[in-house]
Image (cartoon, coloured by chain):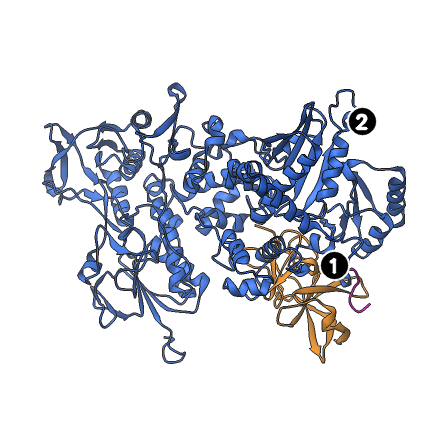
Amino acid sequence: MAFVPIGRLEDIAPLGARRFKRADGVEIAVFRTGTDTVFALRDKCPHKGGPLSQGIVFGESVACPLHNWCIGLADGHAAAPDEGVIERFAVKLEGGMVLLDPDSGVAENGLCSPIAVTAAP
Amino acid sequence: MPDGTLARRPKLVVVGNGMAGMRTVEELLKLRPDLYDITVFGAEPHPNYNRILLSPVLAGEQTIPDIVLNTLEWYRDNGIRLHLGKEVARIDRKARVVEAADGTKESYDRLLLATGSDPFMLPVAGAQLEGVLSYRDIHDTEAMIEAAASYRHAVVIGGGLLGLEAANGLARRGMAVTVVHLMPWLMERQLDRTAAGMLQKTLEAKGLAFRLESQTESLLEGPGGRVRALRLKSGEELPADLVVMAVGIRPNTRLAETAGLHCHRGIVVNDTLQTYDPRIYAVGECANHRGTAYGLVAPLFEMAKVCANHLAEYGIARYTGSVTSTKLKVTGVDLFSAGDFTGGEGTDDIVLADPSAGIYKKLVIKDGKLAGAVLYGDTVDGTWYFRLLREGTSVAPLRDKLMFGESNLGDAGHQGQNRALALPDTAEVCGCNGVCKGAIVKAIKDKGLFTLEDVRKHTKASSSCGSCTGLVEQILMFTAGGDYSESPKKKAVCACTDRTHQEVRDAIREHHLLTIPAAFHFLEWRTPNGCASCRPAMNYYLLSTWPHEAKDDPQSRYINERSHANIQKDGTYSVIPRMWGGETSASELRRIANVVEKYAIPTVKVTGGQRLDLLGVKKEDLPAVWKDLDMPSGHAYAKALRTVKTCVGSEWCRFGTQDSTRMGQELERALWRMYAPHKVKLAVSGCPRNCAESGIKDVGVIGVDSGWEIYVAGNGGIKTEVAQFFCKVGTREEVLEYAGAFLQLYREEGFYLERTVHFVARVGLDYAKRRVLEDAEGRKDLWERLQFALDGEPDPWHEPEKARVDLRQFEPLGA
């Protein structure tokens, strides 16, 4: 478990996101909210794998660009009535630097599977 | 008890645990879940259930547990104190305390009365006998089911909606049922004579007997104090072991009246559902709003929404009354009515009658609008007629097609199926999301859904292209009951606000709002930075209202418009360069071929808009692909001008009368980079053979020998909509000006995501003609405003900085 600096806060647009690519190819979306809080989720919607980093960020949620599922940035959960959860990564701000622990991925249900899925209703 | 530990929350007491009261509580919890400490009194010993579905329970098609809407756990989970089986007897308005018959007391800060209505009991001799019931609640229903098990003869007094449902249910349970009705035909408030006659025939075939224009004189006592017969004024005696009175309901105002609240055929409320005591609200059947007490579910849900909004201290919403529709819940009987269908002075009737097929339809038109509808035997278009009626749509343009229904207007995606009832459970209803009828029915039943929005959220049906909306509405109607919550007349932009698109547009113009935060602040948005629905809309409204003043906010654009390419299912993108009027050249094709090879682009596809689509481009390659293509952006990813499709025209074609390719290219060069509420597609054909398919475009131009015909508001997508003739002009300059002015009108007044066809349907073709054709000055102004807006508009592929494209998105972080 180690935090690595991945860029400055200004490198991410407010209400935007950037992608970080882990050595093994796993992509992690790093989000910046309207209040300059940062969150990190695996860049893969629990629904059909859409890149969440390309979605519209609002409040503490992101809308997936493929089918508009809303994923909570803090917990990786899809907003009801959709069901699904995606891994969260530890991320923090220090002196304007964004620090990410790329190996910290956990999903709420304890799984760290490549993709935590539940079927669409 | 939360009191004492937490800061004291205001107390909301709800009297009435039925659909109106609980719907209000649900709406309130959605808005401000923690605002109140909530207590609910219910006179019945059951949690809230769907009263509309008592008829299917009586008929043996559903059971009581099936129709429970809020389980006891729901109350517990939401921290609601529930007093079941306790009827509130007294309100002390000074002390702000309610007291139940058993002495239970609760104090309140706000009080909500949802006491519903009482069945009206005829004051005839014998009305108190055993076996004489009303038909109102679970208790009545159970008593009827019990009677049906051990007795033979039933009489239902009242041939209205409820009476017929009761009669049908009892007949289904094996009783011999006679319906006694005072009026000359059944359901006289919902049906005209012809439809009622057909209904009566159908019901007679199911074994029901009728005595019309008959009045009950008395009920006769049999052995053991039970009713044995009903005597009519005519002297005829009908054997009856069970008598059900279904002659009407009365708002239950006893409690309100004893508390001194003003009542007049209901508890009188204002547009925010407050009674004369502003701390006390009333919703549902007990309330009288602007002189009307409603007995159906749809209005009650609309009231609930407004009341909850006020209780939540938002106070933006107002209730202005409802238009209602009726659907009889008798299996095998298809019947729908809405509005004023009696006709008369100043109205036109359109009638279709096919008695042997059991079909009858009557539409009543008044002042160019649909005023009422009665459908018997084929109710598939009921929801559509009801929408036209409620929204006051001008039906003049579709009058000749009106009777044949919306199903006649060309939906795609469900094999032309339009009759939900006839569909098997396995039939696919929503072709976009693969949702079958059974899944929708199950969701409606299991989750207690009432609105189209609910169904969309839970099942995804009708949530993509929307072409199956009519079918889903029908399924909802058949499953959830006869009437259900209609989408309100006033539709908010999204859940972040109660403002409509029109109100947002007006405010931006009137108050010269220039940024999204300013607009959110001014319009009192409930969320700090909106959502994925409202931000793109707001961004468009600002830019289209104040060109060159408002600044684009890329973060409020959908990904396609942010990255200027179309996202694909695997996260790659497609790139479509612009080919003016569908013409290309050897050097363009060579560059495209080189790009395809250099970036290993897997698929090249010819599009329907006469261009080439490069599919599977990696996001990081996009800027280089654009540069190497060295062709303008095709805006195939944007709510903007897409293509101008052309035929080869008089330059080559032996039939061509006009140079359509040149005309198309001139239009495309004049209009490209034009953002709009939705995508915009044009076409120009060089002769009436119309090879460019101008008849299904937002603006379609057809060359004729003497000039150009312009058609508008066509659509070739989900629902094929034929463009309507707009005007004929003589010159190419005029084509540009008229087409441009029409599109600018759409840009300035259309709602976000509204195609021209929907825009024109909303404002009326006559309005567009008035603004563009009749008002020459206005037309020139529109055309000039469009040119001003487009002046200096950058090509995002080649002037990304000017177009405010965030180039960082094409590089990974930490690289």
Q: Residue at x 52, y 51 (%)?
A: B458
Count of numbered circles in the view? 2
Real-space Cα separation, disc 2 to disc 1, in angstroms:
40 Å
Q: Is residue A42 left or right of residue B217?
A: right
In the image, residue B94 sits, relative to residue B385, either above or below, namely: below
Residue B28 point in image, percent of width and height = 41, 62
Image disc number at residue B651: 2
In the rendered image, which quarter is residue B681 located in?
A: top right
Taking B777 as reference, is B348 above or below it? above
Does B76 sit left or right of B126 as displayed? right
Residue carrying label 1: B805
The residue depicted at 23 percent of the width and 53 percent of the height is: B252
Q: Which chain is blue?
A: B
- Is the magenta region chiefly helix, strand or loop? loop
Nearer the observer, B475 or A63: A63
Q: Which amino acid, by three-letter code, is at mark 1?
A: Val
Identify the amino acid type marked 2. Answer: Glu
Residue B600 visible here? no
Residue B34 sits above or below residue B475 on the image: below
Q: Secondary structure at mark 2?
A: helix
Residue B188 lies, in percent from the top left, at 27, 33
Specify which label sits upstream in the sequence, 2 or 1. Answer: 2
Chain shown in orange: A
Q: Quadrant of the N terminus of chain B?
A: bottom left
**Front-lying residue, B319 or B180:** B319
User: Residues at marks 2 and 1, common chain?
Assistant: yes
Percent position of residue A35, x then y? 62, 72
Secondary structure beneath dot 1 equals loop
**Is residue B813 part of the magenta span, yes or no?**
yes
Segment tinted magenta in the rendering: B810-815
Q: From the image, which quarter does the C terminus of chain B lie in?
A: bottom right
